[in-house]
Image (cartoon, rainbow, N blue to C red):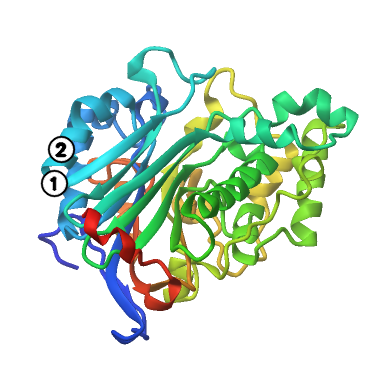
Protein backbone atom coordinates (compact mmCIF):
# COMPACT_ATOMS: atom_id res chain seq x y z
CA UNK A 1 0.00 0.00 0.00
CA UNK A 2 1.35 3.42 -1.01
CA UNK A 3 0.85 5.76 1.95
CA UNK A 4 1.33 8.77 -0.35
CA UNK A 5 -1.70 7.87 -2.47
CA UNK A 6 -5.20 8.39 -1.03
CA UNK A 7 -7.10 5.14 -0.46
CA UNK A 8 -9.65 5.82 -3.20
CA UNK A 9 -6.86 6.01 -5.79
CA UNK A 10 -5.09 2.79 -4.82
CA UNK A 11 -6.38 0.76 -7.74
CA UNK A 12 -4.51 -0.97 -10.54
CA UNK A 13 -5.37 -2.38 -13.94
CA UNK A 14 -5.97 -6.10 -14.27
CA UNK A 15 -4.99 -7.19 -17.77
CA UNK A 16 -6.35 -9.87 -20.04
CA UNK A 17 -4.11 -12.84 -20.66
CA UNK A 18 -4.81 -12.55 -24.38
CA UNK A 19 -4.16 -9.59 -26.64
CA UNK A 20 -5.24 -9.84 -30.31
CA UNK A 21 -2.47 -9.05 -32.77
CA UNK A 22 -2.51 -5.89 -34.92
CA UNK A 23 -4.04 -7.88 -37.75
CA UNK A 24 -7.12 -8.50 -35.58
CA UNK A 25 -7.49 -5.42 -33.36
CA UNK A 26 -6.92 -1.70 -33.72
CA UNK A 27 -6.95 1.31 -31.41
CA UNK A 28 -8.14 1.43 -27.83
CA UNK A 29 -10.97 2.88 -25.81
CA UNK A 30 -11.23 3.38 -22.05
CA UNK A 31 -14.72 3.70 -20.59
CA UNK A 32 -15.49 4.75 -17.03
CA UNK A 33 -18.88 4.77 -15.29
CA UNK A 34 -19.53 6.50 -11.99
CA UNK A 35 -22.61 7.27 -9.91
CA UNK A 36 -21.30 10.44 -8.30
CA UNK A 37 -24.12 10.87 -5.70
CA UNK A 38 -26.56 13.73 -6.11
CA UNK A 39 -26.64 15.99 -3.07
CA UNK A 40 -30.37 16.50 -3.71
CA UNK A 41 -30.92 12.92 -2.60
CA UNK A 42 -29.06 13.40 0.67
CA UNK A 43 -31.37 14.72 3.39
CA UNK A 44 -29.67 15.67 6.62
CA UNK A 45 -28.30 12.69 8.49
CA UNK A 46 -28.88 10.14 5.75
CA UNK A 47 -25.28 8.91 6.01
CA UNK A 48 -24.62 8.43 9.75
CA UNK A 49 -20.85 8.27 9.39
CA UNK A 50 -20.54 11.23 7.01
CA UNK A 51 -21.00 14.78 8.33
CA UNK A 52 -23.34 16.80 6.11
CA UNK A 53 -20.62 19.35 5.34
CA UNK A 54 -18.66 16.62 3.53
CA UNK A 55 -21.57 16.20 1.11
CA UNK A 56 -21.36 19.73 -0.27
CA UNK A 57 -20.22 20.33 -3.84
CA UNK A 58 -17.26 22.32 -2.58
CA UNK A 59 -15.94 19.33 -0.65
CA UNK A 60 -16.81 16.53 -3.07
CA UNK A 61 -16.08 18.04 -6.48
CA UNK A 62 -12.28 18.27 -6.01
CA UNK A 63 -12.25 14.63 -4.92
CA UNK A 64 -14.20 13.61 -8.02
CA UNK A 65 -11.79 15.49 -10.27
CA UNK A 66 -8.78 13.89 -8.56
CA UNK A 67 -10.22 10.45 -9.31
CA UNK A 68 -10.60 11.38 -12.97
CA UNK A 69 -7.14 12.95 -13.12
CA UNK A 70 -5.32 10.13 -11.35
CA UNK A 71 -5.18 7.74 -14.30
CA UNK A 72 -5.81 10.35 -17.03
CA UNK A 73 -6.85 7.66 -19.49
CA UNK A 74 -10.65 7.60 -19.65
CA UNK A 75 -11.90 8.38 -23.16
CA UNK A 76 -15.58 8.15 -22.24
CA UNK A 77 -16.99 8.89 -18.79
CA UNK A 78 -20.61 8.09 -17.96
CA UNK A 79 -21.94 9.72 -14.81
CA UNK A 80 -25.20 9.21 -12.96
CA UNK A 81 -26.90 11.29 -10.24
CA UNK A 82 -25.71 14.56 -11.76
CA UNK A 83 -27.49 17.67 -10.53
CA UNK A 84 -28.34 20.03 -13.41
CA UNK A 85 -27.03 23.16 -11.68
CA UNK A 86 -23.84 21.36 -10.73
CA UNK A 87 -23.45 20.26 -14.36
CA UNK A 88 -24.07 23.75 -15.78
CA UNK A 89 -22.08 25.77 -13.25
CA UNK A 90 -19.19 23.51 -12.31
CA UNK A 91 -18.82 20.08 -13.88
CA UNK A 92 -19.09 20.90 -17.58
CA UNK A 93 -16.46 23.63 -17.43
CA UNK A 94 -14.00 21.54 -15.43
CA UNK A 95 -14.44 18.60 -17.80
CA UNK A 96 -13.92 20.89 -20.79
CA UNK A 97 -10.64 22.05 -19.29
CA UNK A 98 -9.64 18.39 -19.17
CA UNK A 99 -10.43 17.91 -22.85
CA UNK A 100 -13.95 16.48 -22.63
CA UNK A 101 -17.12 17.43 -24.44
CA UNK A 102 -20.35 16.24 -22.93
CA UNK A 103 -24.09 15.88 -23.05
CA UNK A 104 -26.56 15.96 -20.17
CA UNK A 105 -30.14 14.80 -19.80
CA UNK A 106 -32.30 15.59 -16.80
CA UNK A 107 -34.84 13.24 -15.27
CA UNK A 108 -38.45 14.44 -15.34
CA UNK A 109 -39.74 15.93 -12.12
CA UNK A 110 -41.49 13.46 -9.85
CA UNK A 111 -42.52 13.22 -6.22
CA UNK A 112 -38.91 12.85 -5.09
CA UNK A 113 -37.47 15.75 -7.07
CA UNK A 114 -38.28 19.36 -6.30
CA UNK A 115 -38.95 21.67 -9.23
CA UNK A 116 -36.16 23.86 -7.92
CA UNK A 117 -33.06 23.45 -10.06
CA UNK A 118 -30.98 22.67 -6.99
CA UNK A 119 -32.95 19.47 -6.56
CA UNK A 120 -32.86 18.06 -10.07
CA UNK A 121 -31.16 14.90 -11.21
CA UNK A 122 -29.87 13.46 -14.46
CA UNK A 123 -27.03 11.71 -16.23
CA UNK A 124 -24.06 12.98 -18.21
CA UNK A 125 -21.79 11.38 -20.80
CA UNK A 126 -18.40 12.93 -21.53
CA UNK A 127 -15.97 11.99 -24.30
CA UNK A 128 -12.46 13.15 -25.12
CA UNK A 129 -12.95 15.34 -28.17
CA UNK A 130 -9.37 15.08 -29.37
CA UNK A 131 -9.90 11.35 -29.85
CA UNK A 132 -13.56 10.97 -30.72
CA UNK A 133 -16.16 12.76 -32.78
CA UNK A 134 -19.82 12.73 -31.80
CA UNK A 135 -21.83 11.28 -34.69
CA UNK A 136 -25.21 11.47 -32.96
CA UNK A 137 -26.86 11.23 -29.58
CA UNK A 138 -30.23 10.18 -28.24
CA UNK A 139 -31.64 10.98 -24.82
CA UNK A 140 -34.98 9.82 -23.53
CA UNK A 141 -37.21 8.47 -20.79
CA UNK A 142 -37.86 4.78 -20.36
CA UNK A 143 -41.49 5.57 -19.60
CA UNK A 144 -42.02 6.90 -23.12
CA UNK A 145 -40.53 3.73 -24.61
CA UNK A 146 -42.89 1.62 -22.54
CA UNK A 147 -45.90 3.70 -23.56
CA UNK A 148 -45.00 3.34 -27.22
CA UNK A 149 -44.59 -0.41 -26.84
CA UNK A 150 -47.95 -0.72 -25.10
CA UNK A 151 -49.68 0.74 -28.15
CA UNK A 152 -48.65 -2.36 -30.10
CA UNK A 153 -49.65 -4.88 -27.44
CA UNK A 154 -52.88 -6.67 -26.67
CA UNK A 155 -52.91 -6.01 -22.95
CA UNK A 156 -54.84 -8.11 -20.44
CA UNK A 157 -57.73 -6.15 -18.95
CA UNK A 158 -56.18 -5.94 -15.50
CA UNK A 159 -52.87 -4.80 -17.00
CA UNK A 160 -54.52 -2.07 -19.09
CA UNK A 161 -56.05 -0.55 -15.98
CA UNK A 162 -52.88 -0.66 -13.89
CA UNK A 163 -50.37 0.02 -16.70
CA UNK A 164 -49.75 3.72 -15.90
CA UNK A 165 -48.57 2.77 -12.42
CA UNK A 166 -46.65 -0.30 -13.60
CA UNK A 167 -44.53 1.68 -16.07
CA UNK A 168 -44.25 4.87 -14.02
CA UNK A 169 -40.51 5.30 -14.43
CA UNK A 170 -38.72 8.62 -14.13
CA UNK A 171 -35.42 7.12 -15.26
CA UNK A 172 -33.57 8.24 -18.38
CA UNK A 173 -30.93 7.01 -20.78
CA UNK A 174 -28.23 8.63 -22.93
CA UNK A 175 -26.98 6.97 -26.11
CA UNK A 176 -23.96 8.40 -27.95
CA UNK A 177 -22.44 7.18 -31.21
CA UNK A 178 -18.76 8.10 -31.36
CA UNK A 179 -16.22 7.83 -34.17
CA UNK A 180 -12.54 7.39 -33.36
CA UNK A 181 -10.63 10.13 -35.18
CA UNK A 182 -7.58 7.90 -35.63
CA UNK A 183 -9.03 4.53 -36.62
CA UNK A 184 -12.43 5.75 -37.94
CA UNK A 185 -14.03 2.98 -35.87
CA UNK A 186 -17.45 3.69 -34.40
CA UNK A 187 -18.79 2.72 -31.02
CA UNK A 188 -22.18 3.28 -29.41
CA UNK A 189 -22.17 3.95 -25.66
CA UNK A 190 -25.25 3.70 -23.48
CA UNK A 191 -25.39 5.41 -20.10
CA UNK A 192 -28.26 4.28 -17.84
CA UNK A 193 -29.43 4.61 -14.25
CA UNK A 194 -32.35 2.28 -13.61
CA UNK A 195 -35.08 2.36 -10.97
CA UNK A 196 -34.25 1.33 -7.43
CA UNK A 197 -37.17 1.84 -5.01
CA UNK A 198 -35.57 -0.60 -2.58
CA UNK A 199 -35.99 -3.42 -5.09
CA UNK A 200 -39.78 -3.16 -4.88
CA UNK A 201 -40.08 -2.72 -8.67
CA UNK A 202 -37.83 -5.51 -9.82
CA UNK A 203 -39.85 -6.16 -12.99
CA UNK A 204 -39.68 -2.47 -13.95
CA UNK A 205 -35.92 -2.32 -13.44
CA UNK A 206 -35.45 -5.48 -15.50
CA UNK A 207 -37.62 -4.07 -18.29
CA UNK A 208 -35.61 -0.84 -18.29
CA UNK A 209 -32.44 -2.87 -18.75
CA UNK A 210 -33.94 -4.89 -21.62
CA UNK A 211 -35.15 -1.75 -23.39
CA UNK A 212 -31.77 -0.11 -22.84
CA UNK A 213 -29.69 -2.80 -24.54
CA UNK A 214 -32.16 -3.27 -27.39
CA UNK A 215 -32.47 0.47 -27.87
CA UNK A 216 -28.70 0.84 -27.90
CA UNK A 217 -28.30 -1.83 -30.60
CA UNK A 218 -30.95 -0.14 -32.74
CA UNK A 219 -29.39 3.27 -32.16
CA UNK A 220 -25.98 1.89 -33.18
CA UNK A 221 -27.36 0.70 -36.50
CA UNK A 222 -27.35 -3.00 -35.72
CA UNK A 223 -25.52 -5.67 -33.78
CA UNK A 224 -22.41 -5.33 -35.95
CA UNK A 225 -21.53 -1.92 -34.54
CA UNK A 226 -19.48 -2.07 -31.32
CA UNK A 227 -21.63 -1.12 -28.36
CA UNK A 228 -21.12 -0.65 -24.63
CA UNK A 229 -23.86 -0.37 -22.02
CA UNK A 230 -22.79 0.93 -18.63
CA UNK A 231 -24.09 2.74 -15.60
CA UNK A 232 -25.87 2.08 -12.33
CA UNK A 233 -28.13 -0.91 -13.05
CA UNK A 234 -29.44 -1.26 -9.49
CA UNK A 235 -29.25 -5.01 -9.94
CA UNK A 236 -26.95 -7.43 -8.17
CA UNK A 237 -25.44 -10.33 -10.11
CA UNK A 238 -28.14 -12.72 -8.88
CA UNK A 239 -30.99 -10.46 -9.98
CA UNK A 240 -33.13 -10.86 -13.13
CA UNK A 241 -31.72 -7.88 -15.04
CA UNK A 242 -28.19 -9.21 -14.76
CA UNK A 243 -29.27 -12.69 -15.84
CA UNK A 244 -31.13 -11.25 -18.84
CA UNK A 245 -28.05 -9.38 -20.05
CA UNK A 246 -25.81 -12.37 -19.41
CA UNK A 247 -27.94 -14.99 -21.18
CA UNK A 248 -29.98 -12.98 -23.67
CA UNK A 249 -33.39 -13.64 -22.12
CA UNK A 250 -34.98 -14.39 -18.78
CA UNK A 251 -34.72 -18.00 -17.76
CA UNK A 252 -37.65 -19.85 -16.24
CA UNK A 253 -36.47 -19.34 -12.67
CA UNK A 254 -36.17 -15.57 -13.05
CA UNK A 255 -39.51 -15.31 -14.84
CA UNK A 256 -41.21 -17.19 -12.02
CA UNK A 257 -39.35 -15.07 -9.48
CA UNK A 258 -40.65 -11.83 -11.02
CA UNK A 259 -44.21 -13.14 -11.08
CA UNK A 260 -44.05 -14.33 -7.47
CA UNK A 261 -42.30 -11.16 -6.35
CA UNK A 262 -44.98 -8.93 -7.86
CA UNK A 263 -47.76 -11.09 -6.50
CA UNK A 264 -46.29 -10.98 -3.01
CA UNK A 265 -45.89 -7.23 -3.16
CA UNK A 266 -49.15 -6.08 -4.64
CA UNK A 267 -51.69 -8.87 -4.54
CA UNK A 268 -53.42 -9.09 -7.90
CA UNK A 269 -51.34 -6.48 -9.72
CA UNK A 270 -49.80 -8.16 -12.80
CA UNK A 271 -46.09 -8.42 -13.38
CA UNK A 272 -44.60 -6.66 -16.38
CA UNK A 273 -43.31 -10.07 -17.46
CA UNK A 274 -46.91 -10.85 -18.42
CA UNK A 275 -47.70 -7.38 -19.76
CA UNK A 276 -44.71 -7.29 -22.15
CA UNK A 277 -43.82 -10.99 -22.48
CA UNK A 278 -41.78 -10.55 -25.67
CA UNK A 279 -39.65 -7.70 -24.32
CA UNK A 280 -37.64 -9.47 -21.62
CA UNK A 281 -34.80 -10.43 -23.95
CA UNK A 282 -32.17 -8.74 -26.07
CA UNK A 283 -30.62 -9.14 -29.50
CA UNK A 284 -27.03 -8.15 -28.80
CA UNK A 285 -24.64 -10.89 -29.86
CA UNK A 286 -22.09 -12.19 -27.36
CA UNK A 287 -22.74 -9.50 -24.78
CA UNK A 288 -20.31 -9.77 -21.88
CA UNK A 289 -19.55 -8.03 -18.63
CA UNK A 290 -16.07 -6.52 -18.80
CA UNK A 291 -15.09 -7.54 -15.28
CA UNK A 292 -16.34 -11.08 -15.69
CA UNK A 293 -14.41 -11.37 -18.96
CA UNK A 294 -11.13 -10.40 -17.29
CA UNK A 295 -11.28 -11.77 -13.74
CA UNK A 296 -14.02 -14.38 -14.03
CA UNK A 297 -16.61 -12.53 -11.94
CA UNK A 298 -18.00 -9.06 -11.55
CA UNK A 299 -16.70 -6.53 -9.06
CA UNK A 300 -17.17 -7.69 -5.44
CA UNK A 301 -18.91 -4.37 -4.82
CA UNK A 302 -19.41 -0.97 -6.40
CA UNK A 303 -21.58 0.41 -3.61
CA UNK A 304 -20.38 0.58 0.00
CA UNK A 305 -22.73 2.52 2.25
CA UNK A 306 -24.23 2.56 5.70
CA UNK A 307 -27.92 2.19 4.91
CA UNK A 308 -29.22 2.12 8.47
CA UNK A 309 -30.73 5.60 8.14
CA UNK A 310 -32.83 4.52 5.18
CA UNK A 311 -35.01 2.50 7.51
CA UNK A 312 -35.86 5.53 9.67
CA UNK A 313 -36.74 8.17 7.09
CA UNK A 314 -40.26 9.58 7.71
CA UNK A 315 -42.95 8.60 5.18
CA UNK A 316 -40.80 5.89 3.64
CA UNK A 317 -42.57 2.56 3.39
CA UNK A 318 -41.11 -0.18 5.51
CA UNK A 319 -39.61 -3.13 3.73
CA UNK A 320 -42.16 -5.76 2.89
CA UNK A 321 -41.58 -9.38 3.80
CA UNK A 322 -40.68 -10.13 0.18
CA UNK A 323 -38.04 -7.42 -0.02
CA UNK A 324 -36.74 -8.20 3.46
CA UNK A 325 -36.29 -11.80 2.38
CA UNK A 326 -34.33 -10.55 -0.60
CA UNK A 327 -31.95 -8.69 1.69
CA UNK A 328 -31.72 -11.48 4.26
CA UNK A 329 -31.58 -14.49 1.98
CA UNK A 330 -28.24 -16.01 1.13
CA UNK A 331 -27.85 -15.82 -2.66
CA UNK A 332 -26.95 -19.03 -4.44
CA UNK A 333 -25.10 -17.22 -7.20
CA UNK A 334 -21.35 -17.71 -6.60
CA UNK A 335 -20.49 -14.16 -7.65
CA UNK A 336 -22.64 -12.46 -5.05
CA UNK A 337 -21.19 -10.78 -2.01
CA UNK A 338 -23.61 -10.96 0.92
CA UNK A 339 -23.91 -7.93 3.17
CA UNK A 340 -23.12 -9.10 6.70
CA UNK A 341 -23.99 -6.76 9.61
CA UNK A 342 -21.81 -8.82 11.96
CA UNK A 343 -18.80 -8.41 9.68
CA UNK A 344 -19.33 -4.72 8.98
CA UNK A 345 -20.66 -3.59 12.33
CA UNK A 346 -23.89 -1.99 11.13
CA UNK A 347 -26.56 -2.21 8.49
CA UNK A 348 -24.19 -1.61 5.62
CA UNK A 349 -25.12 -2.29 2.05
CA UNK A 350 -22.11 -3.65 0.19
CA UNK A 351 -22.87 -4.92 -3.29
CA UNK A 352 -22.23 -4.73 -7.02
CA UNK A 353 -24.72 -2.47 -8.79
CA UNK A 354 -22.62 -0.87 -11.54
CA UNK A 355 -21.36 -2.65 -14.66
CA UNK A 356 -19.79 -2.26 -18.08
CA UNK A 357 -21.31 -4.60 -20.69
CA UNK A 358 -19.86 -4.80 -24.20
CA UNK A 359 -20.32 -6.57 -27.54
CA UNK A 360 -17.50 -9.10 -27.42
CA UNK A 361 -17.68 -9.98 -31.13
CA UNK A 362 -16.72 -6.40 -32.05
CA UNK A 363 -14.69 -5.30 -29.02
CA UNK A 364 -11.90 -7.00 -27.09
CA UNK A 365 -11.72 -6.18 -23.38
CA UNK A 366 -8.05 -5.66 -22.56
CA UNK A 367 -8.25 -4.68 -18.89
CA UNK A 368 -10.44 -3.57 -16.01
CA UNK A 369 -9.64 -1.36 -13.04
CA UNK A 370 -9.43 -3.55 -9.97
CA UNK A 371 -11.87 -2.67 -7.21
CA UNK A 372 -10.31 -1.13 -4.15
CA UNK A 373 -9.58 -3.41 -1.22
CA UNK A 374 -12.38 -3.07 1.32
CA UNK A 375 -9.77 -2.88 4.08
CA UNK A 376 -9.05 0.65 2.83
CA UNK A 377 -12.70 1.64 3.28
CA UNK A 378 -13.51 -0.01 6.61
CA UNK A 379 -11.39 2.40 8.72
CA UNK A 380 -13.61 5.15 7.27
CA UNK A 381 -16.71 3.07 8.11
CA UNK A 382 -18.54 3.46 4.78
CA UNK A 383 -18.94 5.73 1.77
CA UNK A 384 -19.24 8.65 1.26
CA UNK A 385 -16.67 10.15 3.61
CA UNK A 386 -13.78 12.61 3.60
CA UNK A 387 -11.88 10.50 1.04
CA UNK A 388 -14.56 8.77 -1.02
CA UNK A 389 -16.96 11.39 -2.45
CA UNK A 390 -19.82 9.03 -3.34
CA UNK A 391 -21.57 5.95 -1.98
CA UNK A 392 -20.63 4.29 -5.28
CA UNK A 393 -17.14 3.65 -6.61
CA UNK A 394 -16.12 4.16 -10.25
CA UNK A 395 -15.46 1.19 -12.48
CA UNK A 396 -13.46 1.29 -15.68
CA UNK A 397 -12.60 -0.96 -18.62
CA UNK A 398 -10.24 -0.76 -21.58
CA UNK A 399 -11.17 -2.09 -25.03
CA UNK A 400 -9.69 -2.59 -28.49
CA UNK A 401 -11.72 -2.55 -31.71
CA UNK A 402 -11.79 -5.89 -33.51
CA UNK A 403 -11.14 -5.40 -37.21
CA UNK A 404 -13.68 -8.02 -38.24
CA UNK A 405 -16.53 -6.13 -36.61
CA UNK A 406 -17.32 -3.88 -39.55
CA UNK A 407 -17.23 -0.82 -37.32
CA UNK A 408 -15.03 1.21 -39.63
CA UNK A 409 -16.61 3.78 -41.90
CA UNK A 410 -14.08 4.70 -44.62
CA UNK A 411 -16.59 6.62 -46.71
CA UNK A 412 -16.66 9.33 -44.02
CA UNK A 413 -12.90 9.96 -43.94
CA UNK A 414 -13.08 13.04 -46.10
CA UNK A 415 -15.48 14.70 -43.69
CA UNK A 416 -13.01 14.69 -40.83
Q: Is residue 202 visible?
A: yes
Residue most toward the top? 116
Residue closest to the eye, 164 or 267: 164
User: Residue 78: image x %, image y %?
Assistant: 35, 47
Q: State left or right for residue 253 relative to residue 16.
A: right
Q: State left or right for residue 406 relative to residue 368.
A: right
Which labelled disc corresponds to residue 414? none
Q: Residue at x 36, y 60 (%)?
A: 186
Q: State left or right for residue 328 relative to residue 57.
A: right
Q: How many marks?
A: 2
Residue closest to the eye, 229 or 320: 229
Say above or below: 414 vs 341.
below
Which labelled disc corresponds to residue 98? 1
SS type, badge 2: helix
Say above or below: 250 vs 163.
below
Q: State left or right for residue 318 relative to residue 155.
A: left
* Residues packed near mark 1 inside 10 Å, few (<14), some (14 to 19) or many (20 plus): some
Q: Is residue 372 visible?
A: no
Q: Quadrant of residue 285?
A: bottom right
Q: Are marks 1 and 2 in contact (CB under 8 Å)?
A: yes
* Residues packed near mark 2 inside 10 Å, few (<14), some (14 to 19) or many (20 plus): some
Say above or below: 197 vs 257.
above
User: Residue 270: image x %, image y %?
Assistant: 82, 36
Check disc 2 and report the residue beneath it. Answer: 94
SS type, badge 1: loop
Say above or below: 4 vs 201.
below
CA separation in Å, label 1 and label 2: 7 Å
Q: Residue at x 50, y 55 (%)?
A: 221
User: Residue 118: image x %, image y %?
Assistant: 32, 18
> In what quadrant of the picture does the C terminus appear?
bottom left
> In what quadrant of the picture does the N terminus appear?
bottom left
Q: Residue at x 37, y 22 (%)?
A: 44
Amino acid sequence: MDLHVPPNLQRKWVWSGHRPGPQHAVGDLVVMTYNILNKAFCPEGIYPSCPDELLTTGRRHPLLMKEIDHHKDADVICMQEVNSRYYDDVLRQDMQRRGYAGCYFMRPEDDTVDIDKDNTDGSATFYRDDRFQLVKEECGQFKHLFEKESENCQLPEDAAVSLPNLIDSSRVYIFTLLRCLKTKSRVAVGNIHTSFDFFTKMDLTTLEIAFAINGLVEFAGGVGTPHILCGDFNQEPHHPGYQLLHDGSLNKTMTTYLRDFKSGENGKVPSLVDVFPSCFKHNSRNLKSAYEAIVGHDVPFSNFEDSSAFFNIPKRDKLSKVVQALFDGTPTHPKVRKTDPEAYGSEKYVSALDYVWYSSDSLHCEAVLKMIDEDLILPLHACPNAVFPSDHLPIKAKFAFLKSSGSREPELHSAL
